[in-house]
Image (cartoon, rainbow, N blue to C red):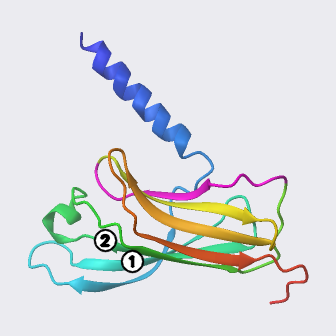
Amino acid sequence: MNTIPRLSLSAAALLLAAASLGAPLHAEEIGSVSTVFKMLGPNDKIVVEAFDDPKVPGVTCYLSRAKTGGIKGGVGLAEDTSDAAIACRQVGPIRIDGKLKDGDVVFQKDTSLLFKTLQVVRFHDRKRNVLVYLVYSDRIIEGSPKNSVSAVAIEKNWMP
């Protein structure tokens, strides 16, 4: 009987790993500001992070998100709120190799110990030649309607 739960946990871990293939495992922290002072543990913060689109060289996204502090936040047990904003920019020549799938996950970050994830997905507006990035939070049972969007025009002759 002990092997059944272990197999289920292993299967769940494999599914989670497969779901995050192609998405950056981490973002580079650019900076943060404290929003709420906590007597014990770190303060609540807004964190600004940057990540490059893994399938579109030349695009970097900047993500600001809430990070819960306190004792639970300090040990990784707190659930972060669904508040996030995104701004994506062309930082070099854009090269799209192959076809982009609309709704591809380009970034994921767990925002609670279990079941809540902050995600960035990409869409290609072919009519306007624009890449659209959407950040939102989801949960296995119920997600949040809070979201933010950014668009990057694909310039043919990009100059720094």
Residue shown at 30% from the left, 47% from the top: 114
On screen, residue 143 versus residue 39, left or right, reads right
Identity, as a three-letter code, of the amino acid under mark 1: Val
Within the image, what quadrant is residue 143 found in?
bottom left
Find numbered disc 2 in the image and state the secondary structure of the residue it sits on. Answer: strand
In the rendered image, residue 2, in percent from the top left (x then y), is placed at: 24, 14
- In which quadrant of the rendered image does the N terminus lie? top left
- Tell me the crowding category of disc 1: few under 14, some 14 to 19, or many 20 or more residues within 10 angstroms, Cα based: some
Identify the mark at residue 67; answer none if there is no mark. 2
Residue shown at 36% from the left, 44% from the top: 140
Identity, as a three-letter code, of the amino acid under mark 2: Lys
In the rendered image, residue 159, in percent from the top left (x then y), is placed at: 85, 88
Circles 1 and 2: CB distance less than 8 Å? yes
**Residue 5 inside the magenta-drawn segment:** no
In the image shown, does 36 or 144 lie closer to the viewer?
144
Read off the magenta span: 98-113
In the rendered image, residue 158, in percent from the top left (x then y), is placed at: 85, 84
Find numbered disc 1 in the image and state the secondary structure of the residue it sits on. Answer: strand
Residue shown at 54% from the left, 46% from the top: 20
Q: Residue furthest bottom?
A: 160
On screen, residue 116 versus residue 134, left or right, reads left
Q: How many marks?
A: 2
Query: Label 1, label 2: how many angstroms apart (C-alpha)?
Result: 7 Å
Q: Residue furthest left?
A: 39
On screen, residue 112 versus residue 65, left or right, reads left
Circle 1 residue: 47
Q: Earlier in the sequence, mark 1 or mark 2?
A: 1
- Tell me the crowding category of disc 2: few under 14, some 14 to 19, or many 20 or more residues within 10 angstroms, Cα based: many
In the rendered image, residue 121, in percent from the top left (x then y), is placed at: 58, 60
Q: Against 57, is 86 above or below?
A: below
